[in-house]
Amino acid sequence: MKIRFVLNGKTEEKHIDLGCQIYEKRIKRFVAFDQVVVPSPRLPSSAKPMHVKEKEAEVMEKVFLTDEYIMLLDEGGQEMTSVEFSDFLQQRMNSGIKSLCFIVGGPHGFADSIRQKSKGSLSLSKMTFPHQLVRLLFMEQLYRAFSILRNDPYHHA
């Protein structure tokens, strides 16, 4: 199985980018992994959130693969412990999915067209985080989940 991480726009935060690079190297020891950064659409600041989400969806949908299993990272999604998330990944690997795609949307969330293509959504916390920081938090959890599956000492239960 391959894991793809689709991100809306580049991060301007160097510390977040550096942390993501570190975890990307670690994750690739366990699984094929790609980050796909889709450009944020250029819209006036007065654009309505629904219009912004629809424009973001147009760009995002171009990078989806055929038969890709899509999961949204969304504050209203299902919450899991790290062990439950590792079980989720193992179940997807056992089911024969070729590509599992996790998506971080923009500050306004996801358009309905993206939600309809997804198989579900995950929340990293009941707290709200900047969508830039979610990148780093998710990648750490992805690495932790594979560490759990491989009985690596990184995760101390």
Image: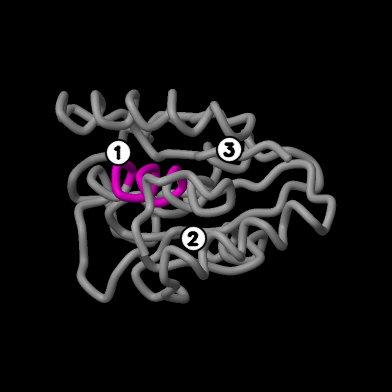
Q: How is the image coloured?
A: one colour
Magenta segment boundaries in residue numbering: 135-143
Report the amino acid beneath label 3: Arg
Question: Where's residue 146, x and y in %?
Answer: 53, 47
What mark, if any, has residue 43 been given in the picture?
Answer: 1
Q: CA distance from mark 1 to mark 2?
A: 16 Å
Rendered view: 122 above or below 27: below
Question: Where's residue 141, x and y in %?
Answer: 39, 51
Is disc 1 surrounded by few (<14), some (14 to 19) or many (20+) residues within 10 Å? few
Q: Residue at x 24, y 24 (%)?
A: 18
Q: Residue at x 60, y 60 (%)?
A: 113
Marks 1, 2: nearer the viewer: 2
User: Do the CB atoms of the residues marked 3 and 1 lie less than 8 Å apart?
Assistant: no
Report the amino acid beneath label 2: Ala
Most foreground residue, 20 or 104:
20
Residue ID for mark 2: 111
Question: Where's residue 83, x and y in %?
Answer: 48, 66
Q: Residue at x 63, y 29 (%)?
A: 32
Q: CA distance from mark 2 to mark 3?
A: 20 Å
Most foreground residue, 42 or 16:
16
Residue ID for mark 3: 4
What mark, if any, has residue 63 been given in the picture?
Answer: none
Question: Where's residue 151, x and y in %?
Answer: 53, 50
Q: Give the quadrant of residue 118.
A: bottom right
